[in-house]
Amino acid sequence: MLYLYAITPQAAPYFTLLKGVSVDLRTLLGQPSATGLPAPFAFGVDPGTHLGVVAYVSTNIGFIVDVNPNLDGTDTHVCFVPGQTPPCVIAPVSINTGPTPRVVMQPQVPLAYVTPGGGFGATSVVDLLQQGTSVKILPFSSTGPSGATRTAGITTIRTQSPHGINPLLGGTVIISGVMTSNANSNFNGTFQIVQVIDPFSFSYAQTGQPDDSETNTSSALGTVQYGVPFFPSALRPMFPVRQLIR
């Protein structure tokens, strides 16, 4: 949980809790019973936009957070979790981290730099102003390819509209709401894309999962969500940055 406080030096107590923003992956990924998910480790915020990024331990995804207290109700950001209002998590972003990621901010520009922190990925430059992308997955079909199928450990997702994933960048997708025909099977979670097949389909690996196909109907579709970094870089930033809390 990310807690937001108001500081009033002349008052007692000096700190007043305004709101808590849930940043745990069980809530954000819609898997309340999941165990062993990566924990939040580092957080940085841009003071001009009140937007920040949360980095997690040894994973392939982070989240952009709106920390504007929104006391007057004028914040129009759309929250990632339906039904919430700002302050809240607003978008996922693809980043690769190790056990000790760090977040640093670019002064006077809404950019965040997330270091791998002992991982094998590159430093990710995150555009804090980006909005996440959400696309619906095709339903099950008995006459043609279904929206979610898995063969020999490779899952293929087919979307109703162009998914917009850059074939050169790939990235991490969040798959949710996909129902299976096999009780021991699961399509949902966060996955690193292994191939962008065409504007409507892509694939990711699920080693050890059985061959399966979704059972979703047109009235209850699964969802693909993702956000990409501004760009990944293997180099350190060559201008002053300020490290924020972790």
Image (tube, rainbow, N blue to C red):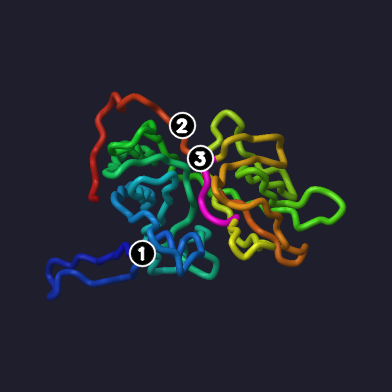
In what quadrant of the picture does the N terminus appear?
A: bottom left
Residue under label 2, please give it: 231
Asked whether the residues under the numbered discs 2 and 1 touch, taking CB atoms below 8 Å apart as contact, a structural biologist would say no
Q: Position of residue 83 (x, y in %)?
A: 53, 70
The mark lying in front, picked from 2 and 1, is: 2
Density class for disc 3 (Cα within 10 Å; few <14, some 14-19, many ≥20) is many
- Residue 49 seen anywhere in this rendered image of the structure: yes
On screen, residue 164 versus residue 1, left or right, reads right
Q: Position of residue 8 (x, y in %)?
A: 18, 67
Density class for disc 2 (Cα within 10 Å; few <14, some 14-19, many ≥20) is some
Q: CA distance from mark 2 to mark 1?
A: 29 Å
- Residue 86 seen anywhere in this rendered image of the structure: no
Badge 3 element: loop
Disc 1 residue type? Pro
Q: Please tell me which of labels 2 and 1 falls first in the chain.
A: 1
Badge 1 element: loop
The mark lying in front, picked from 1 and 3, is: 3
Residue under label 3, please give it: 228
Badge 2 element: strand
Camera-nearest residue between 208 and 94: 208
Residue 69's disc number? 1
Tell me: residue 48, above or below residue 83: above
Q: Position of residue 128 (x, y in %)?
A: 43, 44
Asked whether the residues under the numbered discs 3 and 2 touch, taking CB atoms below 8 Å apart as contact, a structural biologist would say no
Q: What range is drawn magenta here? A: 187-192
On screen, residue 115 versus residue 155, left or right, reads left
Residue at point 40%, 65% (across, down): 70
Tell me: residue 136, above or below residue 123: below
For the stretch drawn in magenta, the main secondary structure is strand
